[in-house]
Amino acid sequence: MRLLVLGFGLVGLAACTGNGPSKTVPQDTAIIAPDAEIEILAEGFTWPEGPVWVEEESALYFNDVPENKMYRWEASTGAELFLSPSGGGTPESTQNMREPGANGIIEWSQAPGQLLLADHGARGLSVLDPNTKTRTTITSGYDGKSLNSPNDIVERSDGALYFTDPPYGLRGLNEAPEKELAFNGVYFLTPDGNLNVVIDDLSFPNGVALSPDERTLYVAVSDPENAVIMAYDTASDGTVSNARIFFDANSELRDGGGLPDGMVVAENGTIFATGPAGVYVLSPEGNVLGTVSTGMPTSNCTLDDDETYLYMTSSSVLARVAVTLD
């Protein structure tokens, strides 16, 4: 484990210098302390993604998507290979895929003790039993056509799911011959298995999250031509309305930087969202409170259950920084 002791800066967006993580926070926020240390917990990955904290194990699971591998990290052992391949499907069905590995991971109330995967290889959502390492795909098609390559998932308190379905797992992306749907959608899956598309007009929907009251759905758009996080009002039946730009990252785009990708929402409504500068700390109103600049494209982030650490997957590393949330 490497420790990086980082300097304190005034509110603003830290430049991606390529010299490793740093942070900038305003002086009037205590979310990240001025003397906080960013810990590099593990490194040497190709593109780590989809982190989820499992409190019962005091462990973090995450995927290295291009390598088709899942890892498990805990403080006493570090990161260890947990599952290979991480994605489902068969060798025949995945041989032409760009990235057949699993991506986003969550714990799901409808399958206690198991993990729910956004499974590129299966082109659907799969429930993984961590003990037997067997998986069951619970949905893989819409309107008689195969999904693209589900990317990220968020659960509503009643067990319903929203998930994004961009074409990143397919070689050729939108031009892939295996792509059956004409759009890259955001879907709503009810606990009894009914699947509906709720957003079909985003170019590359990626990270997805809900506000604590579940009245707002956030969707990151990983499009260099339209790098934004969208917000939508939600209804009890899962449908959404009042589409609006919550955070516009277009002015922050830079060579070697990332795009809006994964995000996590704290219990107090603070949003930690990956983007060109690293991880943006956003208020529920969309104001930038500060950034954690990783110095490299950052794919995703999550919090542990008591919200004391923000875990980040950035290019080739797994890292964390202590946070304080009211």
Image (tube, rainbow, N blue to C red):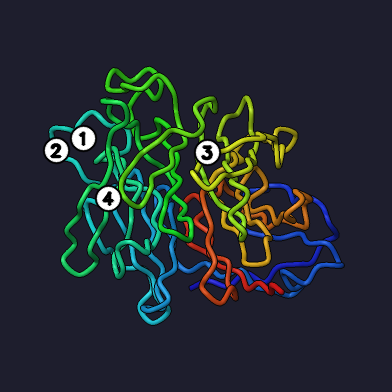
291 with respect to 262 (left or right): right
Q: Secondary structure at mark 2?
A: helix
Q: Specify few, some or many for label 2: CA neighbours under 10 Å numbering under 14, 14-19, or 20 or more.
A: few
Question: Is there CB contact under 8 Å for labels 2 and 4?
Answer: no
Which residue does the image show at 36% across and 22% down from the upper left?
A: 181
Residue 28 pos. (x, y %): 86, 67
- In the picture of the structure, the residue carrying the numbered disc 1 is 94
The three-letter code of the residue at mark 3 reads: Thr
Residue 182 visible at all? yes
Which of disc 4 and disc 2 is earlier in sequence? 2
Question: Is there CB contact under 8 Å for labels 1 and 2?
Answer: yes
The three-letter code of the residue at mark 1 reads: Thr
Q: Quadrant of residue 250?
A: top right
Q: Secondary structure at mark 3?
A: loop
Residue furthest to the front in view is 236
- In the picture of the structure, the residue carrying the numbered disc 3 is 239
- In the picture of the structure, the residue carrying the numbered disc 4 is 126
Q: Is residue 55 above or below residue 50?
A: below
The three-letter code of the residue at mark 2 reads: Pro
Q: Secondary structure at mark 1?
A: helix
Alpha carbon separation for disc pair 4 and 3 = 23 Å
